[in-house]
Amino acid sequence: MKKYYLPLALVGLFILLTGASLLGLLTSYIQMVLMLMGINIILTVSLNLVNGYMGEFSVGHAAFMSLGAYTSAFITTRLIPHLLWGEPLFPVGKLLYTFDVAAHIEGPIWYLVFPLTLLAGGAVAALAGLLVAIPSFRVRGDYLAIITLAVNYIVMNFFANLEPLGGSRGITGIPGFTSVPIVLIWTVISLWAIHNFIYSTYGKGVMAIREDEVAAEAMTVDTRRVKVMAFCISSFFAGIGGGLLAHLLLYINPASFSILRSIEPLVMVYLGGMGSISGSILGAIVLTGLIEALRPLRVWKWAVISLILIILMIFRREGIMGGREFWFLKPKREVEYAPASD
Amino acid sequence: MPLLQIRNLTHWFGGLRAVHNFHENLEEGELVGLIGPNGAGKTTIFNLISGIYRPTEGEIIFNGTNIVGLRPHQISSMGIGRTFQKLRLWNDLTVLDNVKIAQHSRIGYGLSEAVLRIGRYHKEEREIEERSYELLRILGIDKYADQRVKHLAYGDQRRVEIARALALEPKLLLLDEPTAGMGTAEMMRMMELIERIKEEFKLTIILIEHRMKVIMNLCERIKCIDFGAIIAEGTPDEIKENPRVIKAYLGEEAAF
């Protein structure tokens, strides 16, 4: 019976949130905050895979987000209108070109198209992750931090100079496909996939690398392969999160994926706790909530948030959940075993 | 054909020759001791065999294959397990996970099977887990399965490391000072354990030890090295009498 609690709770949550937003019980502001929380959970848990579970230090999550965001936004605002209504694919020479996709779309077919565009965004981000990971993991130490930092700037400048995709003005008129139930579904998928990966014996190789890489190699773990794979999975979900964000904000430009964007999930990882999926959920919810709740303080809110972080690091360095999980996220045993008493 | 054949093995660390012209013909089922003063190059030889260092010169042939230049995970997957002089356990992980992860090369399921928990996933995970419990039981540490390794007593941590090395199904086991830092009673238990696992898992073992009692009781053959070169080889009794060994290893005064 107990194994049905979690699916039942999720279905309940889904019905509750969808119903409440359809019936207008949730203001659009509350819905916006809920969606941001979900997206931030996806970004945080995927970053935790590299920074928490693997013990490497990636600071360029926004680069992979932007690849996912630009890819999916390109598909929904340019590729699909081009294919369906003959709109120009790259409207060069028209400042602030917008085609009102939202006015043309009808019917549930879009609920099928949108996941595919997100997956395409994730795939592009994962491919970029592969290109970054292969050279960076051949060397040890802090190189990944430097390389990912550089990648963040390279990708940002790439989009800023990519005139066919709006250059530094970015892409406008993105249809608002992202909704509360869709974010919830993708959040659950991301958590479930990363949970299953990291708590399989294969995925635990990631943690062995963090604990002692030399020993991991000497104990049959192909560390290079495992590292590249973990980094690709992390980038993939960053791309998914970016795609969701683009179709929530309706407008993206290169500046929205600066290094500051990378810092946000980083803070959420450390707040929630390294190497804990439950921690990533909490960290994302708490920090997103705090940013919203402290809005009346204006600029001072960052002072307050920083202070909270400093206090946390002094009194609880492992974060809220550091290395522990909620009961429903704990990996399950394959066999029952009771040690003989002595 | 010998299980492990080492020929003309030489390794330089910059200008320092750590291993010089080392050779060995290890038959299956042997238990060979490797002794020598601190810094003689014993651990370096282990690191060369397990692929952590790449030798400057020489050949290491394991089971008919030259393993020089292979990466450590490939070498260990072929069946060379080892322990470390200073424990290198995955401290923040549980005892069970330490043993499970060392079976990485046995995993046949792919990424999608792991993420979706379908196909071969459950069957293989069950096998890995059953085997891990079995090893923990044999080493008498099954009651700590769910504890993090860092919370275990030192002697038990040594046992976890041996269990982890056995998990990869080695034919050859390299034990680097398994009784270091142990009291006499613990040392006796460890000696007994080494003999027991050698029988049970049909192992061939190379043992680095400083304690003469362990070496003399366990080994059929002993190699003594100093400054990276072999200075003596023989049965425990021959080694005990050899003046070069006494001089190099036990010190000048011990000769009298």
Image: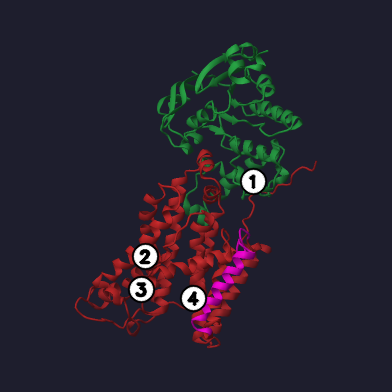
Q: Quadrant of residue B242?
A: top right
Which circle, 1 or 2, is nearer the viewer? 1
Mark closer to the chain start, 3 or 4: 4
**Could you tell me the amino acid type at mark 1?**
Leu
Q: Kindly indicate whether the residue at mark 2 contacts the one at mark 4 (C-beta within 8 angstroms).
A: no
Query: Tag on residue A120?
Result: 2
Q: Are marks 4 and 2 on the same chain?
A: yes
Q: Is residue A209 visible?
A: yes
Label 2: chain letter: A
Badge count? 4
Q: Which residue is mark 4?
A: A36
User: How far is the residue under mark 2 from the one under mark 3?
Assistant: 22 Å
Q: CA distance from mark 4 to mark 1?
A: 38 Å
Pointer 1 and pointer 3: residues touching (CB < 8 Å)?
Answer: no
Give the extent of the magenta segment: A297-324
Q: Are marks 2 and 3 in contact (CB under 8 Å)?
A: no
Which amino acid lies under the numbered mark 2 shown in the image of this protein? Ala
Closer to the N terminus: mark 2 or mark 3? 2
The earlier-in-sequence mark between 4 and 2 is: 4
| Quadrant of image for the C terminus of chain B | top right
Q: Position of residue B239 (x, y in %)?
A: 61, 14
Q: CA distance from mark 3 to mark 4?
A: 18 Å
Query: What is the spatial separation of the Cα atoms under label 1 and label 2, in whole angstroms?
Result: 38 Å
Q: Can the viewer see residue A285?
A: no
Residue that label 1 marks? B96
Q: Colour of chain B?
A: green
